[in-house]
Image (cartoon, helix red, strand yellow):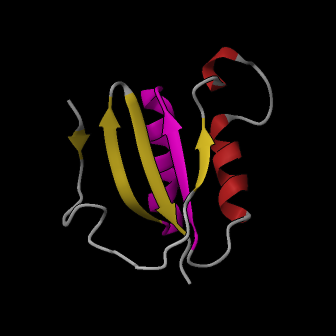
């Protein structure tokens, strides 16, 4: 069963009719490889490449990766508009402010 954290109004309470699809970053294999960049660095780089108003969807089965993304987002003032865990995979959607 899915678990929602800290969100009101579905997908963070913000709905835009013409919202472009999110860029998806799947970290499922990240725990299997000992290579650079680290999962959080991959998220930082992908976020940095977003246009204002765009979204990055991060998917990970590793609780520590999700925790690191939440902590980094909070410290960086980045909006996490979706934070859901379903079938062992956490889905975090970050929105770059316009």
Above or below, comparing residue 65 to residue 50 in the picture: above
Q: Is residue 81 left or right of residue 12?
A: right
Instruction: Tell me what residue is drawn at x 59 percent, y 37 percent.
Output: 26
Residue 69 lies in magenta, yes or no? Answer: yes
Percent position (x, y) of residue 49? 74, 64
Above or below, comparing residue 74 to residue 67 in the picture: below
Above or below, comparing residue 40 to residue 14 in the picture: above
Q: Quadrant of the N terminus?
A: top left
Instruction: Tell me what residue is drawn at x 72 percent, y 18 percent.
Output: 33
Q: How many discs appear?
A: 0
Outermost residue on the bottom side: it is 98
Percent position (x, y) of residue 11? 31, 62
Q: Is residue 34 left or right of residue 43?
A: right
* Pick the front one: 91 or 22: 22
Span shown in magenta: 54-78
Q: Is residue 53 left or right of residue 70?
A: right
Percent position (x, y) of residue 19? 49, 74
């Amino acid at each position: 069963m899915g678990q929602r954290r800290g969100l009101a109004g579905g997908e963070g309470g913000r709905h835009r009719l013409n919202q472009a699809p999110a860029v998806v970053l799947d970290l499922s294999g990240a725990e299997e490889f000992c290579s650079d960049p680290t999962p959080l660095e991959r998220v930082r780089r992908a976020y940095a490449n977003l246009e204002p108003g765009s979204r990055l969807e991060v998917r990970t089965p590793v609780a520590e990766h999700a925790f690191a993304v939440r902590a980094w987002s909070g410290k960086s003032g980045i909006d996490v508009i979706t934070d859901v865990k379903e079938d062992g995979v956490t889905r975090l959607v970050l929105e770059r402010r316009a």
